[in-house]
Amino acid sequence: MSIQSTVLTTQAANILVGGGGLGTATTTVYLCNKTSSNLTVNLFAVSSGFTANGNNIIYSNVLMTSNETYIMDVEKIFLGIGDMLVANASAGNAIVATVSSIKKYFGFRIVKILDC
């Protein structure tokens, strides 16, 4: 399990990139407004090779009141290798996105049974 924190800007930026083994799954995403202003946040689930846009937005203009923390711990997002969780805010250097994730390294084993 790993934890990664990113200070958001008004430009969409990666807050988690899928990689290692079979991909990465989020366990929890925290969005913390560290200012006394009301702000908004956008969150995108972007497939490898694509960019954040209106076709892959999963949270649009989420209102973050002053000094509020928004917690996403029910939804689990699985990112394949190179897929990205991307976010931006209505103001820069005001919201911190912290993602807890786990990389998947297991697979299925196929066993052939021989008749004797």
Image (cartoon, grey):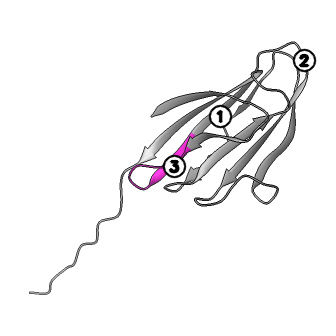
Viewer-closest of 10 and 45: 10
Q: Which residues are magenta?
A: 17-26
Q: Residue furthest left?
A: 116
| Image x and y of residue 14, in percent | 63, 41
Viewer-closest of 110 and 105: 105
Position of 30 compared to 70: left or right? left
Please report the residue visible at 76 percent of the width from the left and 37 percent of the height from the top. 88
Element at label 2: loop
| Image x and y of residue 31, in percent | 72, 28
User: Tag 3: residue type?
Assistant: Gly
Viewer-closest of 96 and 11: 11
Position of 47 compared to 104: left or right? right
Viewer-closest of 44 and 112: 44
User: Tag 1: residue type?
Assistant: Val
Element at label 3: loop
Q: Residues within 10 Å of mark 3 (few under 14, many from 20)?
A: many
Picture quadrant where residue 4 is located: top right
Q: Of label 3 and label 1, which has the lower sequence position?
A: 3
Which residue is labeled 2 in the image?
37
